[in-house]
């Protein structure tokens, strides 16, 4: 896993906070850790005032995204398998996120934009429809060797990765 990327959207103000986390020594982070760090960054940037008690986690093909977190085994049983991906179908996830005021209990639902878009719609197509085009990889780079792209073009890699978080 090269990176985890988050985009926190405040739907009331349309402000966004973006965060990319590079795992240390190849160790996976937990979903709670990643969300905590994204929310703390959003608070520092004044995108949000407080840790939200309820929120939505959106991804495009969550089966690939969620399995990368160290605590996937915990929340896997709390999500539903829908058309070969994961989404909240019944009870929201119960999460405990850190904040400046101490731990905060939150509930979150997981949605997969693959289930909301026409069948077979790629993240690239969805981004184009939403006016958020994906970043094109430079000549000579491919998705199956993103480690080389990261090594050679770290700033462009971050832009590419964060755009993939913004689209959903």
Image: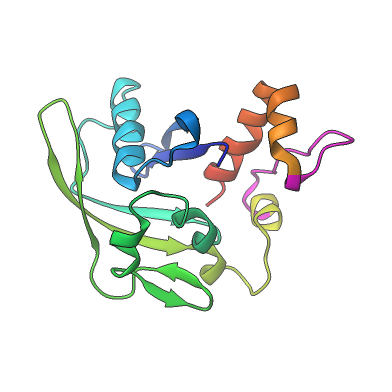
Q: Is residue 21 visible?
A: no
Left or right: residue 50 versus residue 131 is left
**3 within the magenta span:** no
**130 within the magenta span:** yes
Where does the N terminus fall, quadrant-wise?
top right
Residue 9, quarter of the rendered image: top left
Left or right: residue 118 versus residue 68 is right
The dominant secondary structure in magenta is loop
* Residue at x 18% of width, y 48% of height: 53
Left or right: residue 93 versus residue 9 is left
Residue 104, quarter of the rendered image: top left
Rendering coords of residue 161 (x, y %) = 60, 37
Magenta residues span: 129-144
Residue extending furthest front? Answer: 25
Rendering coords of residue 26 (x, y %) = 50, 36
Residue extending furthest right? Answer: 139
Q: Is residue 105 visible?
A: yes
Residue 146, quarter of the rendered image: top right
**Front in this rendered view, residue 129 or 43:** 43
Looking at the image, is 28 positioned above or below residue 55? Answer: above
**Front in this rendered view, residue 93 or 124:** 93
Left or right: residue 144 versus residue 63 is right
């Amino acid at each position: 896993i090269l990176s985890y990327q988050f985009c926190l959207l405040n739907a009331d103000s349309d402000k966004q906070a973006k965060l990319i986390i590079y795992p240390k020594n190849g160790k996976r982070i937990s979903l709670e850790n990643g969300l905590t760090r994204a929310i703390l960054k959003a608070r520092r940037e004044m995108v949000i005032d407080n840790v939200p008690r309820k929120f939505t986690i959106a991804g495009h093909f969550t089966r690939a995204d969620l399995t990368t977190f160290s605590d996937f085994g915990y929340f896997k049983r709390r999500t539903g398998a829908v058309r070969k991906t994961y989404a909240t179908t019944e009870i929201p996830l119960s999460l405990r996120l850190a904040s400046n005021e101490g731990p905060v209990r939150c509930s979150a639902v997981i949605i997969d934009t693959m289930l909301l878009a026409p069948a077979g719609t790629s993240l690239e197509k969805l981004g184009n429809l939403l006016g958020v085009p994906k970043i094109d990889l430079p000549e000579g780079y491919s998705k199956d060797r993103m480690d080389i792209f990261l090594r050679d073009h770290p700033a462009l890699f971050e832009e590419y990765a964060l755009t993939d978080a913004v689209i959903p």
